[in-house]
Image: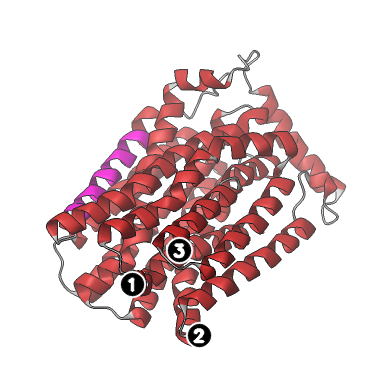
Amino acid sequence: MMLFLISINYIDRASLSVAMPLISKEFEISPTVQGILLSSFFWTYAFMQIPGGMLADRFGPRKVIVASTIGWGFFQGIAALCTGWFSLLLTRLGLGAAEAPIYPAGGKLNSIWMTQTERGRGATLLDGGAPLGAALGAILISGLIAAFDSWRLAFAVAGIGTMICGWFAWRIIRDHPRDHPAVNSAEAEYIEAAHAQDLANEPATTSGRVLDFLRYRSVWGMFFGWMCFNALFYGLLTWMPNYLAAVHGFNIKEMGGAVFLMFFAGFVGEIAGGWIADKWIASGTAQGTVLRIVFAIASIIATIAIYSVSVIKDPIAVVILLSVTLFFLRWCGLFWCIPSILGTRNRVGILGGIMNLGGNVAGIGVPICVGMIVQATGSYFYALMLFTAAGIGLFICSTLLIKYEEKVPV
């Protein structure tokens, strides 16, 4: 269910990127203003990450997830009524605030439902909705726009559909395994035994002060690592449709197909990364060793591939390289294991919020920076160099800064 909801989440947030070539013409807006619009979602999304995690810890993930889903569906739908770029910006601010709790609550749900050797797959199923939703969003939104000959009707249909999904989420999601009618006592006992082992490994004393998280290198490594990851991912999500249209001459249908291939490759890569990590850990290899090696491979290959995009001119080769970038980059969806690895059980939600705050600081800055770079230089070259630098930062943070073997005593 979380894979499905996160997919819907990204279909809705990616809809503006897909429709931007049409919206920019209708509202007559410059690349810089386009960058502001693409960034605006992340202003409130980032701001609400830590409050969203606190809400999940306080009220449980189920209520928070359902309220979030219905809320962002509403803001997606009313975007159809916008008459200019400023009113559209306001709906994006509402969309960001409403979507913000979904990831911290999902990370909390993963820690409740999964054992130590299942959390890699749990994390990548949760986060796999990002590339899957981006892939499906390119097809669905471009298809709806083509079918209705209107981006407004496409946004309205997407918003209403999302609100309906909130009802399904309420029917299916439960805060604890024993609350779910499909879970028998043997399964519940199996999960509870794993959680008891987690509890035994927690620090004997904790400070209880949220600000104490800032004292630990691992928390900063998690924060900046996720920031670098999202600088590259959100850069591709927000600007690649425009890049393919402007530099390689793709029309709306070709663009939708190319973006689908790229982000579906990311989804396949994410599921593969979670499976590899869990199987490797289950074989007896230390969790920290597995994560460091997986993150190193992913960040190195993604960085080389995105750099190569800047020097390759063939459109097909560019789409292949972007697909390779996303396939390996999305292995780093395993970052969503880290809040449950580093945090005590009653702090997983807020630690996930801190991590995702870092990611969405990048979401705020990167679309604007890319827009300014493109407007100033008339080229995407330096934007691609920015993405390359983010890949290098991801390698440093994920392999050198995080101590996967130690829980943070907060």
Q: Nearer the viewer, residue 74 or 410?
A: 74
Q: Which quadrant would the C terminus be assigned to in this image? A: top right
Q: Amino acid at mark 2?
A: Phe
Report which quarter residue 321 is drawn in. bottom left
Q: Is residue 166 left or right of residue 400?
A: right
Can you identify the residue that label 3 sits on?
14
Can you identify the residue that label 1 sits on?
21
SS majority, magenta: helix
Report which quarter residue 28 is drawn in. bottom left
Disc 3 packing (10 Å; few <14; some 14–19; many ≥20):
many
Residue depth check, mark 1 versus mark 3: number of the one nearer the observer: 1
* Mark 1, secondary structure of its residue: helix
Q: Residue at x 61, y 62 (%)?
A: 73
* Mark 3, secondary structure of its residue: helix
Q: Amino acid at mark 3?
A: Ala
Disc 1 packing (10 Å; few <14; some 14–19; many ≥20):
some
Disc 2 packing (10 Å; few <14; some 14–19; many ≥20):
few
Residue depth check, mark 2 versus mark 3: number of the one nearer the observer: 2
Q: Residue at x 58, y 60 (%)?
A: 75
> If you read the primary sequence from the N terminus, does the residue marked by circle 1 or circle 3 appear first?
3
> If you read the primary sequence from the N terminus, does the residue marked by circle 2 or circle 1 appear first?
1
Residue 148, label in figure: 2
Whether residue 279 is in magenta: the answer is: no
Q: Residue at x 17, y 60 (%)?
A: 310
The residue segment tinted magenta is: 382-398
